[in-house]
Amino acid sequence: MSEIIFDLQIFLLNLSFVFLLFFIYHKYIEGKINKFSNEILIGIISAVSIILCMTFPLSISPGFYFDFRQIPFIIGILYGGRKVGVSLLIILLSYRFILDHGPGFYSSLIIYVVMLIGLIFVTPRFQAATKFKNKLILATLAMATSVVLILTVIHFFNINLTGNGWISLILFYSTQVIAIALFILFIERAKTENHMLSELKELEKLKVVSEMAASISHEVRNPLTVTKGFLQLLQDKTISDDKKEFYIRLSLNELERAEVIISDYLTFAKPSLENVELLELNEEIDYVMKIVTPYATMRNITIHLFKAEAIFVAGERQKFHQCLINIIKNGIEAMPGSGQVTINLHQSNEQAVIDIQDTGIGMSNDQVRRLGTPYYSTKTTGTGLGTMVVYSIIKAMRGEIKVESQQGIGTRFTIKLPIVDCKM
Protein backbone atom coordinates (compact mmCIF):
# COMPACT_ATOMS: atom_id res chain seq x y z
CA MET A 1 0.00 0.00 0.00
CA SER A 2 2.81 2.41 0.89
CA GLU A 3 4.42 1.68 -2.49
CA ILE A 4 1.24 2.71 -4.31
CA ILE A 5 1.02 5.94 -2.28
CA PHE A 6 4.67 6.73 -3.06
CA ASP A 7 4.11 6.13 -6.78
CA LEU A 8 1.05 8.39 -6.66
CA GLN A 9 3.06 11.14 -4.97
CA ILE A 10 5.74 10.92 -7.69
CA PHE A 11 3.01 11.03 -10.33
CA LEU A 12 1.42 14.18 -8.85
CA LEU A 13 4.79 15.83 -8.26
CA ASN A 14 5.81 15.35 -11.91
CA LEU A 15 2.46 16.65 -13.04
CA SER A 16 2.73 19.75 -10.86
CA PHE A 17 6.24 20.55 -12.18
CA VAL A 18 5.05 20.62 -15.77
CA PHE A 19 1.78 22.43 -15.07
CA LEU A 20 3.22 25.17 -12.87
CA LEU A 21 5.99 26.20 -15.25
CA PHE A 22 3.83 26.20 -18.37
CA PHE A 23 1.00 27.94 -16.50
CA ILE A 24 3.30 30.83 -15.52
CA TYR A 25 4.58 31.15 -19.08
CA HIS A 26 1.31 30.99 -21.01
CA LYS A 27 -0.67 33.03 -18.48
CA TYR A 28 1.73 35.86 -17.72
CA ILE A 29 4.62 35.92 -20.22
CA GLU A 30 3.55 34.78 -23.69
CA GLY A 31 2.74 37.60 -26.06
CA LYS A 32 4.69 40.17 -24.06
CA ILE A 33 8.03 39.37 -25.67
CA ASN A 34 9.23 38.86 -29.24
CA LYS A 35 9.23 35.56 -31.13
CA PHE A 36 12.93 34.83 -30.62
CA SER A 37 12.70 35.44 -26.86
CA ASN A 38 9.57 33.27 -26.77
CA GLU A 39 11.47 30.34 -28.26
CA ILE A 40 14.32 30.75 -25.79
CA LEU A 41 11.90 30.96 -22.86
CA ILE A 42 9.91 27.92 -23.99
CA GLY A 43 13.19 26.02 -24.27
CA ILE A 44 14.25 27.05 -20.75
CA ILE A 45 10.88 26.20 -19.19
CA SER A 46 10.74 22.84 -20.98
CA ALA A 47 14.33 22.03 -19.97
CA VAL A 48 13.67 22.89 -16.31
CA SER A 49 10.50 20.77 -16.37
CA ILE A 50 12.41 17.83 -17.88
CA ILE A 51 15.19 18.05 -15.28
CA LEU A 52 12.72 18.31 -12.36
CA CYS A 53 10.71 15.35 -13.62
CA MET A 54 13.87 13.25 -14.09
CA THR A 55 15.07 14.20 -10.60
CA PHE A 56 11.97 12.59 -9.04
CA PRO A 57 11.32 9.40 -11.08
CA LEU A 58 9.76 6.01 -10.55
CA SER A 59 12.41 3.27 -10.57
CA ILE A 60 10.64 0.00 -11.27
CA SER A 61 13.82 -1.72 -12.47
CA PRO A 62 17.49 -0.90 -11.63
CA GLY A 63 19.00 1.54 -14.14
CA PHE A 64 15.62 2.43 -15.67
CA TYR A 65 13.74 5.61 -14.65
CA PHE A 66 10.15 6.46 -15.52
CA ASP A 67 8.74 9.98 -15.26
CA PHE A 68 6.84 12.73 -17.08
CA ARG A 69 9.76 14.10 -19.12
CA GLN A 70 7.96 13.21 -22.37
CA ILE A 71 5.30 15.89 -21.82
CA PRO A 72 7.60 18.96 -21.58
CA PHE A 73 9.80 17.42 -24.30
CA ILE A 74 6.89 17.16 -26.75
CA ILE A 75 5.25 20.46 -25.76
CA GLY A 76 8.59 22.30 -25.94
CA ILE A 77 9.23 21.07 -29.48
CA LEU A 78 5.67 21.64 -30.72
CA TYR A 79 5.53 25.25 -29.46
CA GLY A 80 9.22 26.14 -29.58
CA GLY A 81 10.25 24.61 -32.89
CA ARG A 82 13.05 22.36 -34.19
CA LYS A 83 15.98 24.30 -32.68
CA VAL A 84 14.38 24.06 -29.25
CA GLY A 85 13.88 20.33 -29.87
CA VAL A 86 17.58 19.74 -30.55
CA SER A 87 18.52 21.70 -27.41
CA LEU A 88 16.04 19.74 -25.28
CA LEU A 89 17.38 16.43 -26.61
CA ILE A 90 20.96 17.37 -25.67
CA ILE A 91 19.88 18.53 -22.17
CA LEU A 92 17.73 15.44 -21.59
CA LEU A 93 20.38 12.94 -22.67
CA SER A 94 23.17 14.77 -20.83
CA TYR A 95 21.21 14.75 -17.56
CA ARG A 96 20.21 11.12 -18.14
CA PHE A 97 23.89 10.21 -18.60
CA ILE A 98 24.77 11.99 -15.35
CA LEU A 99 22.10 10.08 -13.45
CA ASP A 100 23.14 6.67 -14.78
CA HIS A 101 24.94 5.68 -18.02
CA GLY A 102 23.89 2.03 -17.89
CA PRO A 103 21.51 0.25 -20.27
CA GLY A 104 18.71 2.68 -19.35
CA PHE A 105 20.69 5.54 -20.90
CA TYR A 106 20.93 3.76 -24.26
CA SER A 107 17.21 3.03 -24.25
CA SER A 108 16.60 6.78 -23.66
CA LEU A 109 19.02 7.62 -26.47
CA ILE A 110 17.07 5.47 -28.94
CA ILE A 111 13.64 6.63 -27.73
CA TYR A 112 14.26 10.38 -27.75
CA VAL A 113 16.29 10.52 -30.96
CA VAL A 114 13.44 8.72 -32.77
CA MET A 115 10.88 10.98 -31.04
CA LEU A 116 12.77 14.12 -32.12
CA ILE A 117 12.94 12.95 -35.74
CA GLY A 118 9.18 12.30 -35.73
CA LEU A 119 8.37 15.62 -34.04
CA ILE A 120 10.53 17.55 -36.52
CA PHE A 121 8.04 16.52 -39.21
CA VAL A 122 4.96 17.04 -37.02
CA THR A 123 5.90 20.49 -35.63
CA PRO A 124 5.34 22.55 -38.84
CA ARG A 125 1.87 21.06 -39.24
CA PHE A 126 1.11 21.67 -35.55
CA GLN A 127 2.19 25.32 -35.68
CA ALA A 128 0.34 25.91 -38.95
CA ALA A 129 -2.91 24.41 -37.60
CA THR A 130 -5.57 27.05 -36.93
CA LYS A 131 -8.15 24.78 -35.32
CA PHE A 132 -7.74 23.63 -31.75
CA LYS A 133 -9.05 20.17 -32.69
CA ASN A 134 -6.22 19.59 -35.18
CA LYS A 135 -3.57 20.63 -32.66
CA LEU A 136 -5.07 18.37 -30.02
CA ILE A 137 -5.08 15.38 -32.38
CA LEU A 138 -1.47 15.94 -33.47
CA ALA A 139 -0.18 16.37 -29.89
CA THR A 140 -2.15 13.36 -28.60
CA LEU A 141 -0.94 11.17 -31.48
CA ALA A 142 2.65 12.28 -30.86
CA MET A 143 2.33 11.35 -27.17
CA ALA A 144 0.59 8.03 -27.89
CA THR A 145 3.28 7.13 -30.43
CA SER A 146 6.02 7.97 -27.95
CA VAL A 147 4.37 5.75 -25.31
CA VAL A 148 4.26 2.82 -27.75
CA LEU A 149 7.90 3.50 -28.67
CA ILE A 150 8.96 3.59 -25.00
CA LEU A 151 7.19 0.33 -24.15
CA THR A 152 8.61 -1.35 -27.27
CA VAL A 153 12.20 -0.32 -26.51
CA ILE A 154 11.80 -1.38 -22.86
CA HIS A 155 10.56 -4.78 -24.03
CA PHE A 156 13.63 -5.27 -26.24
CA PHE A 157 15.94 -4.41 -23.36
CA ASN A 158 14.50 -7.41 -21.48
CA ILE A 159 13.56 -5.62 -18.29
CA ASN A 160 12.44 -8.10 -15.68
CA LEU A 161 8.96 -6.86 -14.83
CA THR A 162 6.09 -8.80 -13.35
CA GLY A 163 2.67 -8.74 -14.93
CA ASN A 164 1.56 -6.13 -12.39
CA GLY A 165 4.71 -4.12 -13.18
CA TRP A 166 3.85 -3.99 -16.87
CA ILE A 167 0.25 -3.02 -16.05
CA SER A 168 1.48 -0.20 -13.78
CA LEU A 169 3.91 1.00 -16.46
CA ILE A 170 1.25 0.97 -19.18
CA LEU A 171 -1.18 2.86 -16.94
CA PHE A 172 1.55 5.34 -15.98
CA TYR A 173 2.31 6.20 -19.60
CA SER A 174 -1.31 6.02 -20.73
CA THR A 175 -2.23 8.72 -18.24
CA GLN A 176 0.41 10.89 -19.90
CA VAL A 177 -1.57 10.74 -23.15
CA ILE A 178 -4.55 12.17 -21.27
CA ALA A 179 -2.31 14.65 -19.45
CA ILE A 180 -0.81 16.09 -22.63
CA ALA A 181 -4.30 16.48 -24.12
CA LEU A 182 -5.30 18.49 -21.03
CA PHE A 183 -2.11 20.55 -21.23
CA ILE A 184 -2.74 21.39 -24.90
CA LEU A 185 -6.32 22.31 -23.96
CA PHE A 186 -5.07 24.64 -21.23
CA ILE A 187 -2.34 26.21 -23.37
CA GLU A 188 -4.61 26.86 -26.34
CA ARG A 189 -7.33 28.27 -24.11
CA ALA A 190 -4.79 30.55 -22.40
CA LYS A 191 -3.52 31.70 -25.82
CA THR A 192 -7.09 32.38 -26.99
CA GLU A 193 -7.94 34.33 -23.84
CA ASN A 194 -4.77 36.42 -24.14
CA HIS A 195 -5.57 37.13 -27.79
CA MET A 196 -9.17 38.10 -26.98
CA LEU A 197 -8.00 40.31 -24.11
CA SER A 198 -5.55 42.05 -26.42
CA GLU A 199 -8.30 42.64 -29.00
CA LEU A 200 -10.65 43.96 -26.31
CA LYS A 201 -8.01 46.45 -25.16
CA GLU A 202 -7.55 47.65 -28.73
CA LEU A 203 -11.31 47.96 -29.20
CA GLU A 204 -11.56 49.88 -25.93
CA LYS A 205 -8.89 52.30 -27.14
CA LEU A 206 -10.74 52.79 -30.43
CA LYS A 207 -13.99 53.30 -28.54
CA VAL A 208 -12.42 55.99 -26.34
CA VAL A 209 -10.93 57.75 -29.39
CA SER A 210 -14.29 57.55 -31.16
CA GLU A 211 -16.18 58.91 -28.16
CA MET A 212 -13.65 61.69 -27.65
CA ALA A 213 -13.84 62.71 -31.31
CA ALA A 214 -17.65 62.73 -31.18
CA SER A 215 -17.66 64.65 -27.91
CA ILE A 216 -15.17 67.28 -29.14
CA SER A 217 -17.13 67.65 -32.36
CA HIS A 218 -20.44 68.08 -30.52
CA GLU A 219 -19.20 70.40 -27.77
CA VAL A 220 -17.08 72.68 -29.96
CA ARG A 221 -19.54 72.81 -32.86
CA ASN A 222 -22.27 74.46 -30.76
CA PRO A 223 -20.37 77.67 -29.85
CA LEU A 224 -18.84 77.81 -33.34
CA THR A 225 -22.29 77.53 -34.94
CA VAL A 226 -23.61 80.35 -32.74
CA THR A 227 -20.57 82.50 -33.54
CA LYS A 228 -20.99 81.83 -37.27
CA GLY A 229 -24.64 82.90 -37.08
CA PHE A 230 -23.82 86.19 -35.36
CA LEU A 231 -21.01 86.94 -37.82
CA GLN A 232 -23.45 86.40 -40.69
CA LEU A 233 -25.87 88.83 -39.03
CA LEU A 234 -23.08 91.40 -38.78
CA GLN A 235 -22.93 91.44 -42.59
CA ASP A 236 -26.32 93.10 -42.58
CA LYS A 237 -25.61 96.84 -42.99
CA THR A 238 -29.04 97.86 -41.71
CA ILE A 239 -28.54 96.68 -38.09
CA SER A 240 -27.76 99.28 -35.43
CA ASP A 241 -24.41 99.74 -33.71
CA ASP A 242 -25.90 98.55 -30.40
CA LYS A 243 -26.93 95.26 -31.95
CA LYS A 244 -23.55 94.91 -33.63
CA GLU A 245 -21.84 95.35 -30.29
CA PHE A 246 -24.27 92.85 -28.72
CA TYR A 247 -23.58 90.25 -31.45
CA ILE A 248 -19.83 90.73 -31.17
CA ARG A 249 -19.96 90.30 -27.39
CA LEU A 250 -22.00 87.09 -27.71
CA SER A 251 -19.65 85.79 -30.40
CA LEU A 252 -16.64 86.40 -28.17
CA ASN A 253 -18.38 84.65 -25.26
CA GLU A 254 -19.09 81.62 -27.42
CA LEU A 255 -15.52 81.50 -28.68
CA GLU A 256 -14.31 81.74 -25.09
CA ARG A 257 -16.59 78.82 -24.20
CA ALA A 258 -15.07 76.78 -27.04
CA GLU A 259 -11.60 77.66 -25.76
CA VAL A 260 -12.52 76.46 -22.24
CA ILE A 261 -13.83 73.15 -23.63
CA ILE A 262 -10.63 72.57 -25.62
CA SER A 263 -8.52 73.47 -22.55
CA ASP A 264 -10.44 70.90 -20.51
CA TYR A 265 -9.71 68.23 -23.11
CA LEU A 266 -6.02 69.14 -23.16
CA THR A 267 -5.85 69.04 -19.36
CA PHE A 268 -7.40 65.59 -19.37
CA ALA A 269 -5.19 64.34 -22.20
CA LYS A 270 -2.02 65.82 -20.69
CA PRO A 271 -2.38 65.92 -16.90
CA SER A 272 1.29 66.80 -16.30
CA LEU A 273 2.07 70.11 -14.61
CA GLU A 274 4.23 72.62 -16.47
CA ASN A 275 4.72 75.62 -14.15
CA VAL A 276 5.04 73.98 -10.74
CA GLU A 277 5.38 76.34 -7.81
CA LEU A 278 4.91 76.41 -4.06
CA LEU A 279 1.25 76.95 -3.12
CA GLU A 280 0.00 78.01 0.31
CA LEU A 281 -3.43 76.38 0.50
CA ASN A 282 -5.14 79.02 2.68
CA GLU A 283 -4.25 81.73 0.17
CA GLU A 284 -5.27 79.65 -2.85
CA ILE A 285 -8.63 78.73 -1.32
CA ASP A 286 -9.24 82.44 -0.46
CA TYR A 287 -8.69 83.27 -4.13
CA VAL A 288 -11.09 80.51 -5.24
CA MET A 289 -13.69 81.79 -2.73
CA LYS A 290 -13.67 85.22 -4.39
CA ILE A 291 -14.55 83.56 -7.69
CA VAL A 292 -17.27 81.14 -6.55
CA THR A 293 -18.97 83.26 -3.86
CA PRO A 294 -20.92 85.51 -6.30
CA TYR A 295 -22.14 82.42 -8.16
CA ALA A 296 -23.19 80.81 -4.86
CA THR A 297 -24.95 83.96 -3.63
CA MET A 298 -26.87 84.19 -6.90
CA ARG A 299 -28.22 80.66 -6.26
CA ASN A 300 -28.95 81.28 -2.57
CA ILE A 301 -26.06 79.07 -1.41
CA THR A 302 -23.83 79.88 1.57
CA ILE A 303 -20.18 78.79 1.75
CA HIS A 304 -18.44 78.12 5.08
CA LEU A 305 -14.66 78.00 5.12
CA PHE A 306 -12.52 76.56 7.94
CA LYS A 307 -8.84 77.36 7.54
CA ALA A 308 -5.73 75.85 9.09
CA GLU A 309 -2.19 76.95 9.75
CA ALA A 310 -0.01 77.58 6.72
CA ILE A 311 0.16 74.40 4.59
CA PHE A 312 2.33 74.27 1.48
CA VAL A 313 2.00 71.94 -1.51
CA ALA A 314 3.60 71.82 -4.96
CA GLY A 315 1.44 72.39 -8.01
CA GLU A 316 0.41 74.62 -10.88
CA ARG A 317 -1.65 77.50 -9.50
CA GLN A 318 -4.07 77.92 -12.41
CA LYS A 319 -4.87 74.21 -12.70
CA PHE A 320 -5.29 73.84 -8.94
CA HIS A 321 -7.77 76.74 -8.96
CA GLN A 322 -9.59 75.07 -11.85
CA CYS A 323 -9.81 71.84 -9.86
CA LEU A 324 -11.34 73.49 -6.74
CA ILE A 325 -13.69 75.67 -8.77
CA ASN A 326 -15.04 72.63 -10.65
CA ILE A 327 -15.76 70.74 -7.41
CA ILE A 328 -17.36 73.70 -5.61
CA LYS A 329 -19.37 74.71 -8.70
CA ASN A 330 -20.69 71.13 -9.03
CA GLY A 331 -21.66 71.20 -5.35
CA ILE A 332 -23.52 74.50 -5.81
CA GLU A 333 -25.37 73.18 -8.86
CA ALA A 334 -26.34 70.03 -6.92
CA MET A 335 -28.53 72.22 -4.63
CA PRO A 336 -31.46 73.43 -6.75
CA GLY A 337 -33.14 75.50 -4.02
CA SER A 338 -30.77 76.54 -1.27
CA GLY A 339 -28.07 74.93 0.84
CA GLN A 340 -24.52 75.25 1.98
CA VAL A 341 -21.04 74.21 0.97
CA THR A 342 -18.49 73.57 3.73
CA ILE A 343 -14.77 73.72 2.96
CA ASN A 344 -12.48 72.37 5.66
CA LEU A 345 -8.68 72.51 5.36
CA HIS A 346 -6.50 70.52 7.77
CA GLN A 347 -3.33 68.43 7.99
CA SER A 348 -3.11 64.66 8.58
CA ASN A 349 -0.10 62.33 8.41
CA GLU A 350 2.14 64.62 6.35
CA GLN A 351 -0.74 65.27 3.95
CA ALA A 352 -2.86 68.33 3.31
CA VAL A 353 -6.55 67.42 3.41
CA ILE A 354 -9.27 69.52 1.76
CA ASP A 355 -12.85 68.43 2.52
CA ILE A 356 -15.57 69.96 0.34
CA GLN A 357 -19.04 69.01 1.58
CA ASP A 358 -22.37 70.06 0.05
CA THR A 359 -25.98 69.51 1.13
CA GLY A 360 -27.21 68.68 -2.35
CA ILE A 361 -29.19 65.84 -3.86
CA GLY A 362 -26.31 63.37 -3.49
CA MET A 363 -25.42 60.43 -5.72
CA SER A 364 -25.93 56.67 -5.78
CA ASN A 365 -23.03 54.24 -5.31
CA ASP A 366 -22.99 53.58 -9.06
CA GLN A 367 -22.77 57.29 -9.85
CA VAL A 368 -19.91 57.73 -7.38
CA ARG A 369 -18.08 54.76 -8.90
CA ARG A 370 -18.35 56.21 -12.42
CA LEU A 371 -17.17 59.71 -11.48
CA GLY A 372 -14.02 60.69 -13.33
CA THR A 373 -14.60 58.26 -16.19
CA PRO A 374 -14.72 59.65 -19.73
CA TYR A 375 -17.95 61.40 -20.77
CA TYR A 376 -19.90 60.61 -17.61
CA SER A 377 -21.84 63.42 -15.95
CA THR A 378 -24.63 63.45 -13.35
CA LYS A 379 -25.99 66.64 -14.94
CA THR A 380 -28.22 66.58 -18.00
CA THR A 381 -26.28 69.45 -19.57
CA GLY A 382 -22.83 68.27 -18.45
CA THR A 383 -20.08 66.86 -20.65
CA GLY A 384 -18.27 64.95 -17.88
CA LEU A 385 -15.10 66.89 -18.65
CA GLY A 386 -15.03 68.90 -15.43
CA THR A 387 -14.75 65.89 -13.13
CA MET A 388 -12.23 64.21 -15.44
CA VAL A 389 -10.08 67.33 -15.25
CA VAL A 390 -10.31 67.33 -11.42
CA TYR A 391 -9.06 63.74 -11.22
CA SER A 392 -6.29 64.44 -13.75
CA ILE A 393 -5.01 67.49 -11.89
CA ILE A 394 -4.99 65.79 -8.47
CA LYS A 395 -3.19 62.79 -9.95
CA ALA A 396 -0.58 65.07 -11.54
CA MET A 397 -0.01 66.66 -8.11
CA ARG A 398 0.69 63.15 -6.70
CA GLY A 399 -2.46 63.36 -4.62
CA GLU A 400 -5.61 61.31 -4.25
CA ILE A 401 -9.29 62.08 -4.26
CA LYS A 402 -12.11 60.28 -2.46
CA VAL A 403 -15.85 60.80 -2.92
CA GLU A 404 -18.56 59.93 -0.40
CA SER A 405 -22.21 60.61 -1.13
CA GLN A 406 -25.70 59.80 0.08
CA GLN A 407 -28.81 60.55 -1.92
CA GLY A 408 -30.86 63.33 -0.34
CA ILE A 409 -28.06 64.22 2.11
CA GLY A 410 -25.13 65.46 0.04
CA THR A 411 -21.67 64.73 -1.28
CA ARG A 412 -18.18 65.12 0.18
CA PHE A 413 -15.00 65.35 -1.88
CA THR A 414 -11.82 64.67 0.09
CA ILE A 415 -8.58 65.76 -1.58
CA LYS A 416 -5.25 64.64 -0.10
CA LEU A 417 -1.98 66.20 -1.27
CA PRO A 418 1.60 65.65 -0.11
CA ILE A 419 2.87 68.52 2.03
CA VAL A 420 6.06 70.34 1.07
CA ASP A 421 8.35 71.26 3.96
CA CYS A 422 9.41 74.89 3.40
CA LYS A 423 12.15 74.63 6.02
CA MET A 424 14.19 72.26 3.85
Image (cartoon, rainbow, N blue to C red):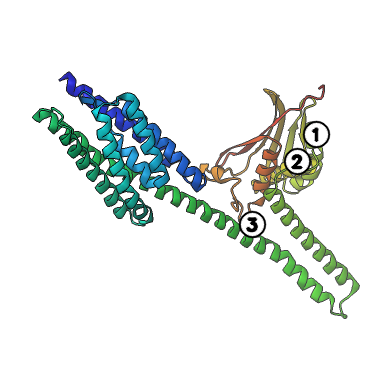
User: In the rendered structure, are the residues bearing label 2 and label 1 in contact, judged by CB atoms less than 8 Å apart?
Assistant: yes
Tell us which disc is closer to us: 2 or 3.
2
Look at label 2 and name its amino acid. Answer: Phe
**Which element is circle 1 on?**
strand
Q: Residue at x 22, y 22 (%)?
A: 6
* Between 372 and 362, the one nearer to me in the picture: 372
Q: CA distance from mark 2 to mark 1?
A: 9 Å
State the residue lying farthest toward the right: 241
Q: Horizontally, is 93 left or right of 210 in the view?
A: left
Res 320 label: 2
Q: Is residue 65 visible?
A: no
Between the C-alphas of marks 2 and 3, the distance is 24 Å
Q: Is residue 97 left or right of residue 2?
A: right
**Nearer to me, 359 or 225:** 225
Among the two numbered marks 2 and 1 on one chain, the one whose residue lies closer to the N terminus: 1
SS for dot 2: helix
